[in-house]
Amino acid sequence: MFTGIIQAVGKIKDVKASEKGACFVFESNAIDLNDAKIGDSIAVNGVCLTAVELTNNTFLADVSQETLDCSIFANFQTGDKVNLEKALRLNQGIDGHLVSGHVDGVGVVSNRYSEGESTRFEITVEQDLVKYIARKGSICINGVSLTVNSIEGNAFGVNIVPHTFTVTTLGDLHIGTEVNVEIDIIARHLEQLLNATKNA
């Protein structure tokens, strides 16, 4: 589990295709990997990955074809910046919201404009995800925990404050950029529970 509070921005040092997907090497001097070990989970742009090799400032992770098909990872190239977060510890506070690292779909930035001191992004998603998104509810975009401020059709709006621009990659988003979207895990489980109750 994760919180959606980004700990560092890293970059893709290397990427190679494999028989079952791809192998990525991520690099960052800003995240502390000294307490990490092989097998630990690290979220990269909101996708939970397993570290299979580690150095002081790099980690290697295998990415399945399923993840490539369901996320923006298929578009990544060497040198691209990514948001990083190590897995939540039991003694750690939750400043964002509970994030599983399982991307539900890919959204597209359909608008971007200044709104006071923040920047407003409107993100369009597939229609089947809209029912899980609630105004003033939580959503995760490229691994960042955000509050939904509006919903219109199959697009929702979020505001990014200057601090978030500084410590994440969201400031690089522009109209047409694809992003990883994870809906609130509670909404997903509520639907499963309600469906099970109806079919009982």
Image (cartoon, rainbow, N blue to C red):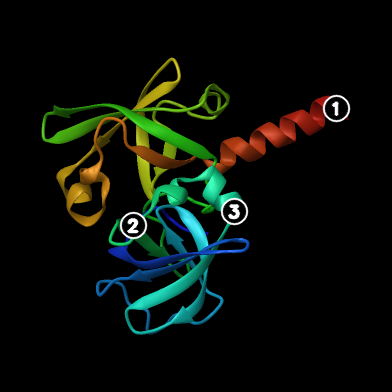
User: Residue 166: x, y in percent?
Assistant: 17, 53
Q: Helix, strand, or loop for circle 2? A: strand
Q: Which comes sooner in the sequence, label 1 or label 3?
A: 3
| Residue annotated with mark 1 | 199
Q: Which comes sooner in the sequence, label 2 or label 3?
A: 3
Kindly identify the amino acid type of the residue bearing the numbered disc 2. Asn
Spatial CA span between label 1 and label 2? 40 Å
Quadrant assignment, res 32: bottom left
Residue 65 disc label = 3
Please say if 118 is above or below 77. Answer: above
In the displayed orientation, state which residue is furthest to the top.
153
Which is more toward the observer, 69 or 116? 69
Kindly identify the amino acid type of the residue bearing the numbered disc 1. Asn
> Residue at position x 36%, y 62% from top?
84
Quadrant assignment, res 56: bottom left
Mark 2 near mark 3, Cβ–Cβ under 8 Å? no
Kindly identify the amino acid type of the residue bearing the numbered disc 3. Gln
| Residue annotated with mark 2 | 83
> Residue at position x 49%, y 51% from top?
98
The answer to whether residue 186 is left or right of residue 171 is right
Residue 16 disc label = none
The answer to whether residue 180 is left or right of residue 115 is right
Q: Is residue 68 visible?
A: yes
Give the class, few, some or many, for how many residues have Cα within 10 Å of label 2's Cα (few <14, many ≥20).
many
Mark 1 near mark 2, Cβ–Cβ under 8 Å? no
Q: Helix, strand, or loop for circle 1? A: helix
Spatial CA span between label 1 and label 3? 33 Å
Which is more toward the observer, 138 or 77? 77
User: Residue 94: x, y in percent?
Assistant: 41, 57
Give the class, few, some or many, for how many residues have Cα within 10 Å of label 3's Cα (few <14, many ≥20).
some
